[in-house]
Image (spheres, helix red, strand yellow):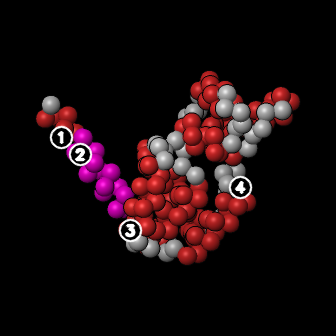
């Protein structure tokens, strides 16, 4: 069961004295898309670099750090294009996977909208520090701003997908 992956691997890693962060194990489980073999393979790849933490995952999988997401979301919702492009450029220049960035943005928006709409916390998905950031951000950003950015994102994605389709048809 992939949901038990972080808990079961935590026990194994403590026994073998390999340093790890639970958040990194959760991220590996999510990245594997439900396939236990993929999760184990990804974990072994990260272990080869010495420790299972978010910095290592960032390097191996091009994973964007949560703080970068919070800053980018804030800039987008504040309509600060210069800051948003600067953050996007920094993430891209650091070799981060931009596809991961977009997936992480979607997940971030989802959690932010649910938190904003219901006031519920997400103990299974977020650590205490992240929850604090989400609570702060949900108070600073209006639901209208979230929807504006969300709609802008989907229009851009659809335009990009249409452009890729036209290029394929042209070939």
Number of on-image labels: 4
Position of residue 76 measured from the top left corner of the image (x, y, whole percent)? 43, 67
Badge 3: how crowded within 10 Å, few (<14), some, or many (20+)? few
Q: Is mark 4 in CB contact (under 8 Å) with mark 3?
A: no
64 or 50, which lies in front? 50
Q: In this view, does 78 lie above or below 40?
A: below
Q: Residue furthest left?
A: 170
Expressed as whole percent of the image width and height from the top left, the position of residue 148 reads 38, 68
- The answer for how far apart the CA atoms under marks 1 and 2 are is 6 Å
As drawn, 108 above or below 76: above
Q: Is mark 4 on a helix, strand or loop?
A: loop
Residue 82 numbered tag: 3
Q: Which residue is drawn at 62% across and 37% down?
A: 28
Rounded to the nearest whole Å, what is the CA distance between mark 4 and mark 3?
A: 30 Å
Residue 127: which numbered mark, if any? 4
* Mark before the other along the chain sequence, 2 or 4: 4
Q: Residue at x 84, y 32 (%)?
A: 17
Expressed as whole percent of the image width and height from the top left, the position of residue 83 reads 43, 67
Task: Based on the picture, tell me whether residue 163 belongs to the magenta stretch.
Answer: yes
- Which residue is disc 1 drawn over? 166
Residue 162, numbered circle: 2
Point out the stretch of residues depicted in magenta: 151-164
Query: Can residue 70 be seen in this snapshot?
Result: yes
| Marked residue nearer the N-terminal end (4 or 3) | 3
For image coordinates 72% across by 36% down, the residue present is 51
For residue 97, side relative to residue 55 (left or right): left
* Local crowd size for mark 1, using a 10 Å CA cut-off: few (<14), some (14–19), many (≥20): few
Whether residue 5 is situated above or below residue 72 in the rendered picture: above
Answer whether labels 1 and 2 touch (C-beta < 8 Å): yes
């Amino acid at each position: 069961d992939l949901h038990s992956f972080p808990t079961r691997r935590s026990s194994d890693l403590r026994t073998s004295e390999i340093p790890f962060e639970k958040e990194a194990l959760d991220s590996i489980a999510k990245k594997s898309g439900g396939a236990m073999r993929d999760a184990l393979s990804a974990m072994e790849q990260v272990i080869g670099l010495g420790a299972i933490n978010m910095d290592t995952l960032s390097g191996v999988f091009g994973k964007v750090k949560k703080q970068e997401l919070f800053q980018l979301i804030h800039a987008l919702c504040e309509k600060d294009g210069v800051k948003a492009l600067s953050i996007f450029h920094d993430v891209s220049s650091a070799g981060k996977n931009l596809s991961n960035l977009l997936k992480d943005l979607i997940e971030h928006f989802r959690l932010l909208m649910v938190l904003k709409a219901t006031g519920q916390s997400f103990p299974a998905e977020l650590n205490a520090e992240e929850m604090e950031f989400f609570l702060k951000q949900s108070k600073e950003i209006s639901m209208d701003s979230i929807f504006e950015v969300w709609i802008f994102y989907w229009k851009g994605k659809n335009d990009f997908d249409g452009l890729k389709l036209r290029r394929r048809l042209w070939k």
